[in-house]
Image (cartoon, rainbow, N blue to C red):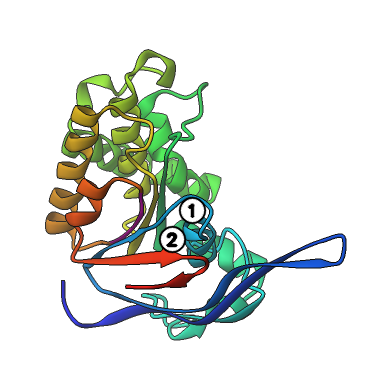
């Protein structure tokens, strides 16, 4: 980890409306993420952790506030991501970010290798992907090797354990060399031993790749592995 800030959230507010009633979820959140940092966000259910992760990952938009991001792409470096078009934010999600969820979200009709290749299939046009297919396939195999399940590359998600599925999801998140990987309860669906192995894998990958990780978790063991730990309560950080 170094001191370079690559992502800053400022005065982030998220509200929902129900029958003209405003329901506040996030209240003027400020957050900085450093290059190569593992940052954990903890708190009870319903305090806004996953909502914040979805906003940072551009899966949702804030009611107000700014999301300043320092991208590798000079055309968007230093941009407020909350002000960009849907097309541009979709490209950023695919190229700059990776995602790991509690329930894996692997496509059941694709084998493990094909699931890991998916972000590259989305990134490149059909012709470009075909031209780079061997290179990209070798990279996907290398990622499966790195997360310890290369021998399962031809298996389908239903043939795998929960831990193996999560390893595959982590490999998929790294396919396009993201700067930031967002993890929403990555061990929430796993037993203690398997969850511990995922803890080790995340810290190992952070050391190897210098990718930044933001972890939303109830798992205190996982939270303690982070470089920083933030506690959320009622839509604000209290630590």
Residue visible at 47% across and 24% down?
Answer: 110
Residue contact between numbered discs 1 and 2, judged by CB atoms under 8 Å: yes
Q: Is the N terminus in the top left, top right, bottom left or bottom right quadrant?
A: bottom left
Residue visible at 86% across and 66% down?
Answer: 20
Whether residue 74 appears in magenta in the rendering, the answer is no
**150 is higher (above) or lower (below) than 10:** above
User: Residue 150: image x %, image y %?
Assistant: 21, 27
Q: Secondary structure at mark 1?
A: helix
* Alpha carbon separation for disc pair 1 and 2: 7 Å
Q: Which mark is residue 95?
A: 2
Write the start and end of the magenta stretch as one range.
Answer: 213-217
Residue tagged by mark 1?
123
Tell which of 71 and 58 is nearer to you. Answer: 58
Q: Name, please, the residue furthest toward the top.
A: 159
Q: Name, please, the residue furthest toward the right.
A: 19
User: Residue 181: image x %, image y %?
Assistant: 35, 57
Tell which of 49 and 1 is nearer to you. Answer: 49
Instruction: Please identify the quarter of the rendering in which residue 12 is found.
Output: bottom right
**130 is higher (above) or lower (below) than 7:** above
């Amino acid at each position: 980890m170094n001191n370079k800030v690559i992502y800053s959230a400022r005065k982030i507010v998220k509200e929902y409306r129900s029958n003209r009633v405003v329901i506040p979820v996030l209240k003027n959140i400020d957050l900085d993420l450093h290059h190569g940092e593992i940052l954990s966000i903890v708190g009870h259910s319903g305090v806004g952790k996953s909502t914040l992760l979805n906003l940072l990952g551009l899966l949702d938009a804030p009611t107000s506030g700014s999301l300043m991001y320092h991208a590798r792409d000079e055309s968007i470096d230093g941009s407020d991501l909350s002000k960009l078009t849907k097309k541009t934010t979709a490209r950023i999600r695919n190229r700059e970010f990776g995602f790991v969820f509690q329930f894996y979200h692997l496509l059941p009709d694709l084998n493990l290798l094909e699931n890991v290749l998916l972000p590259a299939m989305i990134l490149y046009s059909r012709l470009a992907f075909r031209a780079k297919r061997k290179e990209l396939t070798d990279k996907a195999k290398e990622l499966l090797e790195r997360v310890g399940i290369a021998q399962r590359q031809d298996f389908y998600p239903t043939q795998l354990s929960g831990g193996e599925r999560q390893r595959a999801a982590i490999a998929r998140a790294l396919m396009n060399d993201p700067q930031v990987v967002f993890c929403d309860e990555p061990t929430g669906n796993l037993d203690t031993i398997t969850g511990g192995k995922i803890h080790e894998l995340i810290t190992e990958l952070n050391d190897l790749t210098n990718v930044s990780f933001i972890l939303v978790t109830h798992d205190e063991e996982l939270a303690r592995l982070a470089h920083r730990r933030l506690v959320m309560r009622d839509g604000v950080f209290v630590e």
